[in-house]
Amino acid sequence: MIDDLKKVPVTDWELRKVKNQLQADFIRRQSSNEGLAGMLSYCETILGDWRYIVNYGKNIENITPEDLRDTANRYLTPDNRTIAIMKKD
């Protein structure tokens, strides 16, 4: 599946589904002060600017299948992999 992401762009339908989920989640998180505070602090801490939230929707809409393929090729590599082995005691 990861190799597919690296070679074949996702379909427009798949990308639309994920964008809709992200947009809906974004709206739901703003329904409480706690959710909004969490989003603002995340943007400030991880992205370096709380104002990122202003353009969040537009940024999500601008993602293309090619962007996802390029990102998969850049970050989903064996060197970036973490492997966990679970053993039953």
Image: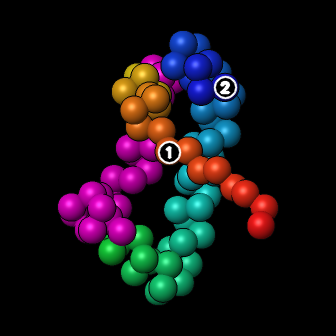
Identify residue for label 2: 1
- SS for tag 2? loop
Q: Is residue 83 above or below residue 44?
A: above
Q: Which one is in front, 68 or 57?
A: 68
Q: Amino acid at mark 1?
A: Thr
Q: Mark 2 or 1, which is nearer the eye?
A: 1
Q: Residues within 10 Å of mark 2 (few under 14, many from 20)?
A: few
Q: Is residue 59 above or below residue 37?
A: above
Identify residue for label 1: 82
Q: Position of residue 19 (x, y in %)?
A: 57, 43
Magenta region: 42-69
Decide which of tag 2 and tag 1 comes sooner along the chain. Answer: 2
Residue 27 showing in the rendered view:
yes
Residue at (43%, 23%) from the top-left corner? 73
Q: Is residue 38 magenta?
A: no
Q: Position of residue 18 (x, y in %)?
A: 62, 42
